[in-house]
Amino acid sequence: MNHLAGLPEGRVPVLRLPATPQDTNAGGDVFGGWLMAQVDIAGSIPAVLRADGRVVTAAVRSMSFLKPVRVGDLVSLYAEVTEVGRSSIRVAVEAWVQRRRPRPEAMRVAEAELVYVAIDERGRPRPVPKEAAGG
Ligand SMILES: CC(C)(COP(=O)(O)OP(=O)(O)OC[C@H]1O[C@@H](n2cnc3c(N)ncnc32)[C@H](O)[C@@H]1OP(=O)(O)O)[C@@H](O)C(=O)NCCC(=O)NCCS
């Protein structure tokens, strides 16, 4: 079986994990905050690579929950740098799920835009290095 079935073609998720019962509220639904945490982790991955070092999350510019996530869903997160400032890095994140029951399907469940800031060892903003040739 293709483990990326139904997900966007030609794109590679930066993070994949299942939603488990411990990620739910008392009503049995997956917390929006759980998904936000995964989105933040996913967004930080291209930000750290682009910054070539430590970053902090400066802002969640937007976060939209498009469809509910259910226990057992396999969540895949896609994250791409969209803009680089002096010390800031803007990242677009999409969350998708693959669900097996009652029938196999995949859908986009959330989209977000976050801003990370490259910091030095004292937590102060530092310039993002120029992009190396070849990425
Ligand atoms: C993010 C942080 C390092 C910025 O420090 P600062 O002294 O305010 O820095 P500056 O005002 O010089 O801004 C630095 C850059 O961040 C950007 N920035 C700061 N706050 C921002 C915000 N709310 N939204 C978007 N960009 C922001 C600025 O536009 C600037 O970008 P540029 O260098 O590309 O032009 C500081 O606010 C911080 O440490 N915040 C806490 C971060 C954190 O702990 N996150 C995890 C929370 S649990």
Image (cartoon, grey):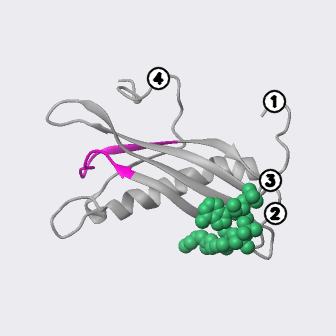
Q: CA distance from mark 3 to mark 2?
A: 6 Å
The residue that mark 1 highlights is: 134
Judged from the image, the quadrant occupied by ligand 1 is: bottom right
The residue that mark 4 highlights is: 9
Secondary structure under tag 2 reads loop
Which contiguous range is marked in magenta? Answer: 64-78
The residue that mark 2 highlights is: 126
| The residue positioned farthest toward the bottom in the image shown | 122
Of badges 2 and 4, nearer the viewer stands 2
Query: Callout 4 environment at 10 Å: few (<14), some (14 to 19), or many (20+)?
Result: few
Q: Are the residues tagged 3 and 2 within 8 Å (C-beta)?
A: yes
The residue that mark 3 highlights is: 128
| Disc with the residue nearer the chain's start (3 vs 1) | 3
Query: Callout 3 environment at 10 Å: few (<14), some (14 to 19), or many (20+)?
Result: many
Kindly identify the residue that appears in the image at 79 percent across and 76 percent down.
122
* Left or right of residue 30, residue 133 in this image: right
Q: CA distance from mark 4 to mark 3?
A: 30 Å
Q: CA distance from mark 1 to mark 2?
A: 23 Å
Secondary structure under tag 3 reads loop
Whether ligand 1 has any atom under 8 Å from the Cβ at mark 4 is answered as no
Whether ligand 1 has any atom under 8 Å from the Cβ at mark 3 is answered as yes
Q: CA distance from mark 2 to mark 4?
A: 35 Å
Q: Is residue 95 above or below residue 102?
A: below
The amino acid sitting under disc 1 is Gly
Write down the quadrant of residue 24 in the picture: bottom left
Screen quadrant of the N terminus: top left
